[in-house]
Image (cartoon, grey):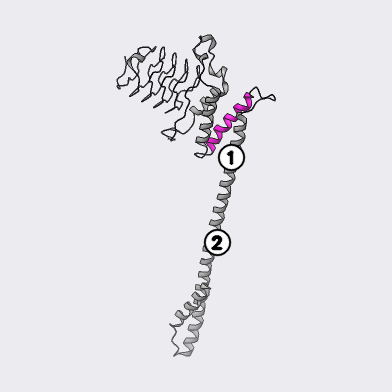
Amino acid sequence: MIYLLFGLLLWWALDQYIDPSEAEQASTAKKDLFQAWGFIMAGVAGVVGIYFTWQNLRQTQESTQDTLRLTAQGQNTDRFTRAIEQLGATDDKKTTPKLEIRLGGIYALAQIASDSSEEYHWPVTAVLAAYIRQHAPRKEEGLRSKEDRPHLSRRLPDVQTILNVLGRRARYYGHGERIRIDLGYTGLWGAHVNPGAHFEGVYFDGAILENVSLAEAQLEGASFEKAKLNGANLEGANLREANFKEADLSDADLSGADLTNANVTKEQLDMVRSLEGTIMPDGLTHH
C-alpha cells in the first residue's frame, strides 16, 4: 500500500514539470516521464525487496543461533547429569566404588566446565569440592607413623585426581570466581599438586596436610587455620596474605616461598625445615 501511494505521489510530482502548452512536446515529455517513473519505481522495489530479504535472513540467523544455544544448553545439562551419576558409581552390591567410572565422571565434569564457559564452572567446582569433603574427611589416621600414611594418589586416587582438576581450572578466586572453595577439615595427607596449581583463597582450615606437596602452588589468600602442615613441601609457593593461625608448620619446607603479609608467627616459622630465600611477612627476604 505504501509502495503504491509513493508511486502515485512520484507520478504527480514529475507531472508538474511538463508544460501542457506544447502538445507535441508534452507527449514526448509524457513518454520520458513514464520511463523515468518506471525506472524509479523499479529501483525502489528492488531496494525494498533487498531490505525485506535482509530482515528475513537476520531473523533466520537469530532463530538458528537461539536454537543452537538451547540445544547446547540441553546437551550440557544431560552431560552434567550423567557425569554426576558417574561420581556415585558402585559395584552391583552397592558397596565398592567403581573407580574407573568415577574417574571418567571427574574428567567429564572438568570438560563440561571448560566447554560451557562460565555457566557450569562454579557448579562443577562446588560438586568436586563437596566430593572431596565427603570422601576424604579429616581422620586421626593422618597422625600415625609414615608407614601408615600412604600418599593420597594410592589411598584415594579419585580425590587426588579432583585436586589436579581443580588446580588446572581456568577461573579461580579473584579471577572469575567470587566464592572460595571449601576444603576445610579434610584428610589430604600425602597429596601432590602440580606446580602453578590454582588454590587462591581456598579454605584448608582444620585440614590434615601432612607431607603434601604444594610446591610453587598459587595459594594467595588461602586459609590454613588450625591445619596440620607438618612435613609439607611449600617450596616456592605463593602464600601472600595466607592465614596460618594456629597451624602446625613443623618440618615444613618454605624455601623460596612468598609470605608477604601472611598471618604467621615467629614461633611457627622457627619450626619449619627451611626458610632459605623465603620472602617474609614484612617483605624482606630471609637469608
Q: Element at badge 1?
A: helix
Position of residue 65 relative to residue 132, above or below, is below
- Residue 127 colored in magenta in the image: no
- Residue 106 colored in magenta in the image: yes
Position of residue 63 relative to residue 43, above or below, is above
Residue neighbourhood size for the residue with mark 1, other residues' Cα within 10 Å, grouped as few (<14), some (14–19), many (≥20): some
Task: List x then y, in percent, for residue 16.
Answer: 44, 83
Residue linked to disc 2: 53
Task: List x then y, in percent, for residue 57.
Answer: 55, 57
Splitting the image into 4 quarters, where does residue 177 fall? top left
Query: Mark 2 belongs to which amino acid?
Result: Thr
First in sequence: mark 2 or mark 1?
2
Task: List x then y, in percent, for residue 118.
Answer: 49, 39
The answer to whether marks 2 and 1 mark residues whose Cβ atoms lie closer than 8 Å is no
Q: Residue at x 51, y 32 (%)?
A: 126
Q: Which residues are magenta?
A: 95-115
Residue 275 makes an appearance in the image: no
Question: Looking at the image, is mark 2 or mark 1 nearer the viewer?
Answer: 1
